[in-house]
Image (spheres, helix red, strand yellow):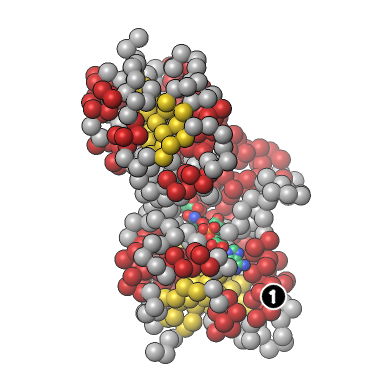
Amino acid sequence: MEFKKKILCIGAGYVGGPTMAMIALKCPQYKVTVVDINAERIAEWNSENLPIYEPGLYDVVEKTRNVNLFFNTDLENGIKESDIIFVSVNTPTKEFGAGEGMAADLQYWEATARQILQLSESSKIIIEKSTLPVKTALAMERILSFSKSDIHFEVLSNPEFLAEGTAISDLTNPDRVLVGSNETESGLKARDELVEIYSNWVDRDKIITANLWSSELSKLVANAFLAQRISSINSISALCEKTDADVSEVANAIGMDSRIGKKFLNASIGFGGSCFKKDILNLVYLCQYYGLPEVAEYWLSVVKINEFQQTRFIMNMLNAMFNTLAGKKICLFGFAFKADTGDTRESPAIFISKKLLEERAELRITDPGALKNAKSDLENIEGKISYIKEPGKAAYGCHAIAVLTEWEVYKGLDYKEIYKSMEQPAFIFDGRNILDHKKLFDIGFNVFPIGKPALTHF
Ligand code: NAD
Ligand code: UGA
């Protein structure tokens, strides 16, 4: 079949895989190829067990795979034959040298730019899909400007706003699609080409355009604002616990103000995920770099409150359980950084597990989709850990349950039976405020929610 356009995506991760599957589904006239240096990951994309767990993703992949969506490791051919290249490689926090622990590590990014330069035989549009520091497109343009004289590369920014667990619905119905371009003739022409791709399924008024730097910066700022709301409500949860106020009631009361809004006000054990912390630290680094220490400090406090919230959760457990956890069996309900994903990157569960093991507790970890990742996250950590798929079995004989991920399944368990099987006095620490606390208390549990008065029998 003759395809109208050939699209390549470099990086078959949480973003590259689902976004390209959606483009392939909505645009049968385009050939979409996703390449990755990780051959194992590509093999999984070509199998029934996709490398990421995301509701609805398999259906989309099944409909398009080997029709107009292809996964392979042939970067060279992919670059040569494509008109448009999305770059969706990882951009983790730098772990060495200047900006260590804060700036974005752009080595994978730059390597990709050089490969595109080296292998291209025709002009192309290069699209930044990864989240990058503002002005990265300039560096990319400079590298790509060393091309053969008849080849032109136009760099666009098209940050991705999907959230894990809801990737398919976010991609089907995005709040907005952002396209940043140079405001030159070739920049605007490339911008229109990308806008045309999204127009196959997204309302035109939701596709917004901006200059390159606004687009790059908007992505960092969007994540920083979302994370800031969580840290704000979590900071208030600490005050609620001291004053007998209830953080859900406070969130409800403030959220009904349409200027504040209801979303992202769930107090928790803190935000996790591969991006919030990395992107805020990236923003902090940029502010420091541009000589704005006060602005840097402001955004850094969002990360500090997140760490405080996780430490607070551990201290609450320790205090409630008579100041010793040594030898006690603690069951962790959930390990993923949020529900409906198997992803555990930066999950608060990792920090909490390590701290509990330092206190010499014994861990029973259960999670419907993240046990494989949990095992690898805790691989080299000393201590007793078992991984048990079924939550009732995992809690059997434990002294306490700590709810770390808001999986729906935990709401409907038979807590009467679970209570009977546990060591007494039995504790529940609801780090997500998803359970019926009064009911659990009536069963006999000592219940410790986040930001609400504890319900205890002594
Ligand atoms: P990921 O680690 O899941 O995937 C990145 C992939 O790129 C990996 O499979 C890696 O092998 C591959 N890769 C690295 N260098 C390569 C190269 N030179 N050639 C070919 N493949 C290469 O990362 P992700 O979660 O998909 O994130 C990608 C980017 O998107 C990041 O910048 C992230 O901040 C951003 N983002 C992520 C999300 C999310 O929900 N995970 C949402 C929005 C934006
Ligand atoms: C987030 C953003 O929501 C996406 O728009 C963005 O594209 C993405 O980061 C990214 O750049 O990677 P994601 O991290 O997948 O998406 O998930 P969120 O739903 O934002 O949740 C992040 C964390 O905050 C989770 O640990 C979640 O449990 C926590 N959270 C969320 C709360 O503690 N309280 C809330 O009210 C909401």
Q: Nearer the viewer, residue 65 or 121?
A: 65
Q: Residue at x 31, y 34 (%)?
A: 393
- Residue 104 horizontal/vertical position (percent): 65, 53
Position of residue 312 in the picture relative to residue 112 (left or right): left
Q: Residue at x 44, y 86 (%)?
A: 4
Position of residue 239 in the picture relative to residue 302 (left or right): left
Above or below for 156 versus 420: below
Image quarter for residue 447? top left
The amino acid type, in three-letter code, at marker 1 is Leu
Could one spot residue 382 in this view of the protein? yes
Image quarter for residue 311? top right
Label 1 neighbour load within 10 Å: few <14, some 14-19, many 20+: many
Q: Residue at x 53, y 41 (%)?
A: 378
Q: Nearer the viewer, residue 295 or 69?
A: 69
Position of residue 43 in the picture relative to residue 443 (left or right): right
- Work out which quarter of the rendered image holds the C terminus and state it: top left
- Residue 368 horizontal/vertical position (percent): 35, 45
Q: Secondary structure at mark 1?
A: helix
- Residue 85 horizontal/vertical position (percent): 55, 75
Question: Which quadrant of the picture is home to ligand 1?
Answer: bottom right
- Residue 109 horizontal/vertical position (percent): 64, 64
Q: Is mark 1 within 8 Å of ligand 1?
A: no
Q: Residue at x 72, y 85 (%)?
A: 148
Q: Nearer the viewer, residue 377 or 223?
A: 377
Could one spot residue 175 in this view of the protein? no
Above or below for 174 versus 281: below
Q: Which residue is mark 1?
A: 144
In this rendering, the count of numbered labels is: 1
Above or below for 156 versus 153: above
- Residue extending furthest toward the top: 458
- Work out which quarter of the rendered image holds the N terminus and state it: bottom left
Q: Nearer the viewer, residue 457 or 248?
A: 457
